[in-house]
Amino acid sequence: MGCCIGITSGKGGVGKSSICIGLGIVLAKSGYRVCLLDMDLGLKNLDVMLGLENRVFYDVLDIYEGKCSLNQALVQAKHTENLMLLAACKSIHVHKMNQNMLKDVIEELQQKFDYILLDAPAGIESGFAYTLDLADRFIVVTTLDMTALQDADRIIGILMRESSKKIQCVINRMSPKYIDKGISIQMNQALDTLCIECIGIVYEDETIIKGYNHGQPIVYNKNSKAWHCFESIKKAFLGEELAIPKYSKSLLKRIFSS
Ligand SMILES: Nc1ncnc2c1ncn2[C@@H]1O[C@H](COP(=O)(O)OP(=O)(O)OP(=O)(O)O)[C@@H](O)[C@H]1O
Ligand SMILES: [Mg+2]
């Protein structure tokens, strides 16, 4: 029975979809069967970031309305056999969506996949409510900006209030230079604010933006910084080792010193 992970944030644009794809790729490359489910109802992100926009024909609504089978709606990632994408609702008919539709499909997905990563929309609208109900555990994504941290903290509060499921966080767009200069919040302060387990960090990295703009995630490149970040996140996510092990001691001292 596959595990369903809700990837969420308070503030928009902090990197949920990027983290969803990055984690999905490294898990799939490790042999796990992974499905990414785009919960941004009515909007589309994951297909574009994966370079699959021309290959998405169906979504969950189509499955529910009998227009296609689950297998027909699943789109395989270009460089990874066991990484699939499913759009929750790519059309404007989001009002037709409901929790039961998603629940049925996720139950079917759980028979086929080890991990189902739900890429939630920002905030607390319907896509978030569905994610909250359907996921078995959560990853809250934030940057080291105060507004993102405060919104992440709020989401953590809601998740804790509504369920007792596991919640972990990932710090995205971390810039040692910005930390050094006192521009962004210190890691210590951020982790004190969130007060949940951090399973890793991803550096501020323009090759990440470039990769997604070209539908070719940089995480595929094993020489990239991003790949190392996501490998560490994967290990911590799987409980294999303590988070954030891959960085030099001096860097760790810099980013964690208050
Ligand atoms: N570590 C990073 N370094 C630099 N840019 C990044 C990083 N992570 C994400 N980005 C860029 O930030 C932008 C927003 O990322 P993304 O779409 O993943 O955020 P999101 O939280 O899913 O947004 P939304 O709330 O709109 O769904 C994208 O242009 C992406 O390429
Ligand atoms: Mg997104």
Image (cartoon, rainbow, N blue to C red):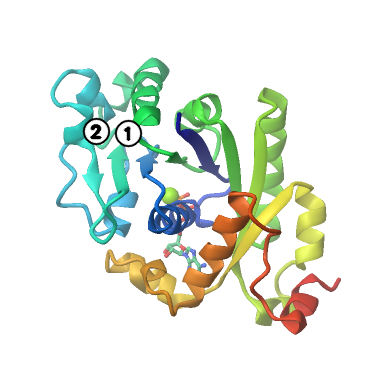
Nearest the eye: 163 or 143: 163
In the figure, is residue 128 to the left or right of 247? left
Q: Give the image location of residue 5, x and y in percent.
A: 51, 38
Name the residue rendered at 22%, 24% in the picture: 63
Mark 1 falls on what kind of element? loop
Q: Are marks 1 and 2 in contact (CB under 8 Å)?
A: yes
Q: Is residue 147 left or right of residue 221?
A: right
Q: Nearer the viewer, residue 79 or 14?
A: 79
User: Relative to 17, is 38 above or below?
Assistant: above
Q: Is residue 81 left or right of residue 117?
A: left
Rendered position, 2 above or below 196: above
Other-residue count near label 1 (Cα within 10 Å), few / some / many at <14 / 14–19 / ≥20? many
Of labels 1 and 2, earlier in sequence is 2
Viewer can see residue 46: yes
- At mark 2, the secondary structure is loop
Q: Which residue is mark 1?
A: 88
Q: Which mark is residue 59?
A: 2
Q: Amino acid at mark 1?
A: Ala
> Who's the residue at 47% across and 55% down the image?
23
Quadrant of residue 64 within the rendered picture: top left
Q: Nearer the viewer, residue 195 or 114?
A: 114
**Label 1 – label 2 distance at C-alpha:** 5 Å
Mark 2: which amino acid?
Asp
Which residue is at the front of the view, 125 or 20?
A: 20
Q: Quadrant of the C terminus?
A: bottom right
Q: Does mark 2 have its CB less than 8 Å from ligand 2?
A: no
Label 2 CA crowd tier, 10 Å (few <14, some 14–19, many 20+) = many
